[in-house]
Structures are given as structure tokens and as C-alpha cells.
Image (cartoon, rainbow, N blue to C red):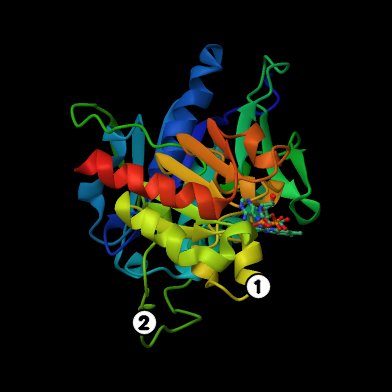
């Protein structure tokens, strides 16, 4: 008998808010497709789990993004996020369908929901992961190798859950790329009727006050020009280059710590994870905690006066020089190219 009889497929919790699906769900579906492709002999499918009210029509979007099947739990008690009702419903889906693994975004919601479900199921959970692979040495099972930063981000640890199923993980948004949707893709949609332990809410949400986001969301920018401590005294210049390129300003933690910028534009392990098509790092040393947040950018250009700076080891192109000399020249060239 197989070690985990009846457990099958990679499930992805597809987070939505007001019917709008968060990109991280699609990023995880794209990654799950690669994982199942790496173990063709297991015949695993990618299954999306969609919870909410009035969201059944979103199932086709989930299929278009790569799911073979979508389990929809459409219920008035799931209208807004509730730890109690979401944990009840997701636990029942897992108990009914027995996924081999379940991936969830390491969002505020995912970080709340996944550990509760894992505790109810007595399953192993790796939180805040940045990389997932299949163990190539295990041919008769789909053992996930889940990597996450540890010891303050100075090391990466790879965690396995060999004894229980499902193997659960929360994964940071923007770590994996999202494949383009194929609206003609076909898949199965299963409607699941949950039985809640109690329909009496333990917590009543009286009012939701949306956070007013000031400034830009750097995770959505296609071009980022980022300043490190070496450029914190010429942020206007860095910003001007960003504007000429139609991009946004980002910073390293040193710039935030030194009081030159707000944390919401900080890139890195304790800041945002970004993957723009162009990332220009100005006066940034390339510490691993910074790199963890931007290394997946399509093109990285580094400007640093120290030729030995770590940032050059991950840059596609580098300028050794003073940012105050290089940036004005760069700006001039951009203006010329645009003319
Ligand atoms: P520095 O390390 O001071 O480097 C400045 C660079 O600028 C140097 O390479 C120097 O050669 C160059 N330079 C100086 N002057 C010029 C000039 N005029 N022209 C050109 N180049 C110049 N950091 C983050 O960024 N994001 C995070 O999320 C983050 N999280 C962290 C979490 C933990 C738990 C810890 C311990 C640290 C974290 N850090 C983070 C901090 C990280 O370790 C580094 O200290 C930080 O990234 C350094 O920022 P920096 O490269 O801008 O500054």
C-alpha cells in the first residue's frame, strides 16, 4: 500500500476579496503546474480552492490560469474573510478530497488561515516560503522541499513534511511568476457544500475601514529605480531617473532606517518582494536580505562605486562609479532616447 493512500494532487488556495482574485493565487497555480510536470508518473492535477460568496463565476478564470479543477465553496457566511468560517470550510474540503499538498499565499489572510487549518488537520506547514521543489530522490511520493529565509534572513532553510499529508506551505506574493491565462482552457468545476461547526460567528466584524494607500504600490511597478545608502543623499536624482523611465522609486532598508524614506517602498526580506522588468540598484551593496526581494527582476542594472560590491554578482549590467556622476548621464541619455 502507498505510504499516503488516497492523497493526491497539488491544491492551491485561491484568495479573493470582493470577488477580485489576488495575483498570488495565480502565481501559485503557475508554480504548481511546474511541480506536477516534474512528477509525471504521479498523474497529479492542479486544483484551485475558491471560497467566498457569489464567486462561482470566477472558477473559469482559475482554470484559464492553469488549474485542472476548481473546488468552489460559495456560501453567504464566506462573504468577507472570517477565520472561523474559512477555516471550517477549507478543513472540510481537505478532509473530503485529501490533497497531497496545499499552497497558500503568505498574505495577511493566508498567514491567518493556513496555520489554523494545519493545526486542525495535524499537518506540517512551512510558513513564508520563497522556493518549492519536488524531491527528485523520492520516486514513489511527491515530497516537497520548501525553502524559506531563516535566522534573520542570513540563511535559507529547506523544510520537509515527510510524515503527514497534506504538506502545507504559505508562499510570499511575487516570488513566482504568473503564466499568461488561456481563456480556452477547459477544466472541471466542483461545487462543495460546507457544514459549519456553528453558524454563530465568534467574532463580529462591525465595520471594515479600507487602508488608504498613499503613494504607489512598488510591487505593481514595471520599472523600479532603487536607492541604497550610497544614494540616500540624492534621492531626488534617483526619483527623477525613475520618472523619466516611467517607473517608481524604491529603497533599501538602510535608507528607511536612516529616515530618508518610508517603509512602504522598501525592497527586501522585511520589505516588499518585487519582480519588475527593470530594476536599477543605485548605491546598494547587495546584502542577501535586499537581494531576496528583487533578484527575480527580469533585468538588473547596478551602479556602485565599489567594484567588489555583492550587487554586481546578480546584476545583468553594472556601472562602477559614483551615483551622482552616473545618474545625471543616464537621465540625459534617457531624455535623448525619448526625443
Ligand atoms: P550599505 O550596505 O551601506 O551599502 C551602500 C553601498 O553603496 C555600498 O556598496 C557602497 O559601495 C555604495 N556607495 C556608497 N556611496 C556611493 C556613491 N556615491 N556612488 C555609488 N555607490 C556608492 N535590507 C534591505 O534592503 N531590505 C530588507 O528588507 C532588509 N531586511 C533585513 C532583515 C534582517 C533580519 C536584517 C538583519 C537585515 C535586513 N536588511 C534589509 C539590511 C541588510 O542586511 C543591509 O544592511 C542593507 O540592505 C544595506 O543597505 P544598502 O546596501 O543600501 O547600504
Check disc 2: other Cα within 10 Å, few if <14, some if 14-19, many if 20+.
Answer: few
- Corner quadrant of residue 319: top right
Q: In which quarter of the image is residue 42?
A: top right
Is 31 placed left or right of 208 in the picture? right
User: What x and y, as percent, mark residue 7?
Assistant: 58, 31
Quadrant of image for the C terminus: top left
Circle 1 residue: 258
Which is more foreground, mark 2 or mark 1? 1
Q: Badge 1: few (under 14), some or many (20 or more) residues near its Cα, within 10 Å?
A: few
Specify which label sits upstream in the sequence, 2 or 1.
2
Q: Residue 98 carries which label?
A: none
Q: Is mark 1 on a helix, strand or loop?
A: loop
Q: Quadrant location of the N terminus?
A: top right
Q: Where is residue 263 in the image (x, y as percent from the top left)?
A: 55, 69
To which residue does mark 2 refer?
208
Q: Where does the image place residue 201, in percent across and percent down from the top left? A: 45, 79
Q: Is mark 1 within 8 Å of ligand 1?
A: no
Q: Residue at x 56, y 40 (%)?
A: 295
Q: Does residue 9 appear in the picture of this structure? A: yes
Instruction: Identify the element where label 2 is drawn.
Output: loop
Could you tell me which residue is drawn at 49 percent across and 18 percent down? 37
Judge whether 220 appears above or below 101 on screen.
below
Residue drawn at 56 percent across, 35 percent down: 318
Residue drawn at 61 percent across, 43 percent down: 130
Query: Which residue lies most toward the bottom here?
Result: 206
**Position of residue 158 measured from the top left corner of the image (x, y, whole percent):** 74, 37
Amino acid at each position: 500500500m502507498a505510504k499516503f493512500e488516497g492523497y493526491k494532487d497539488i491544491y492551491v488556495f485561491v484568495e479573493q476579496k470582493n470577488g477580485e482574485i489576488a495575483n498570488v493565487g495565480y502565481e501559485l497555480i503557475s508554480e504548481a503546474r511546474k511541480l506536477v510536470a516534474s512528477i509525471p508518473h504521479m498523474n497529479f492535477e492542479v486544483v484551485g480552492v475558491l471560497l467566498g460568496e457569489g464567486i462561482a463565476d470566477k472558477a473559469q478564470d482559475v482554470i484559464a490560469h492553469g488549474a485542472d479543477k476548481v473546488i468552489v465553496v460559495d456560501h453567504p457566511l464566506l462573504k468577507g474573510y472570517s477565520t472561523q468560517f474559512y477555516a471550517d470550510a477549507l478543513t472540510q474540503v481537505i478532509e473530503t478530497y485529501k490533497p497531497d499538498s496545499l499552497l497558500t499565499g503568505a498574505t495577511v489572510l493566508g498567514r491567518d488561515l493556513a496555520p489554523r487549518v494545519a493545526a486542525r488537520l495535524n499537518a506540517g506547514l512551512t510558513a513564508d516560503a520563497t522556493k518549492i521543489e519536488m524531491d527528485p530522490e523520492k520516486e514513489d511520493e511527491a515530497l516537497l522541499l520548501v525553502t524559506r529565509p531563516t535566522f534573520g534572513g542570513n540563511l535559507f532553510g529547506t523544510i520537509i513534511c515527510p510524515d503527514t499529508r497534506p504538506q502545507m506551505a504559505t508562499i510570499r506574493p511575487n516570488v513566482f511568476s504568473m503564466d499568461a491565462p488561456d481563456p480556452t482552457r477547459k477544466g472541471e468545476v466542483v461545487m462543495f457544500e460546507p457544514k459549519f461547526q456553528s453558524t454563530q460567528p465568534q467574532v463580529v466584524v462591525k465595520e471594515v475601514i479600507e487602508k488608504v494607500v498613499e503613494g504607489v504600490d512598488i510591487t505593481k511597478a514595471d520599472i523600479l529605480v532603487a536607492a541604497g545608502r550610497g544614494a540616500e543623499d540624492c534621492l531626488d536624482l534617483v526619483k527623477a531617473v525613475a520618472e523619466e523611465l516611467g517607473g517608481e522609486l524604491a529603497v533599501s532598508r538602510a535608507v528607511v532606517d536612516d529616515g530618508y524614506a518610508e517603509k512602504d517602498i522598501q525592497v527586501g526580506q522585511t520589505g516588499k518582494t518585487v519582480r519588475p522588468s527593470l530594476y536599477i540598484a543605485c548605491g546598494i551593496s547587495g546584502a542577501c536580505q535586499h537581494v531576496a526581494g528583487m533578484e527575480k527582476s527580469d533585468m538588473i542594472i547596478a551602479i556602485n562605486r565599489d567594484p567588489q560590491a555583492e550587487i554586481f554578482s546578480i546584476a545583468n549590467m553594472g556601472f562602477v562609479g559614483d551615483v551622482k556622476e552616473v545618474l545625471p548621464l543616464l537621465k540625459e541619455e534617457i531624455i535623448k532616447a525619448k526625443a
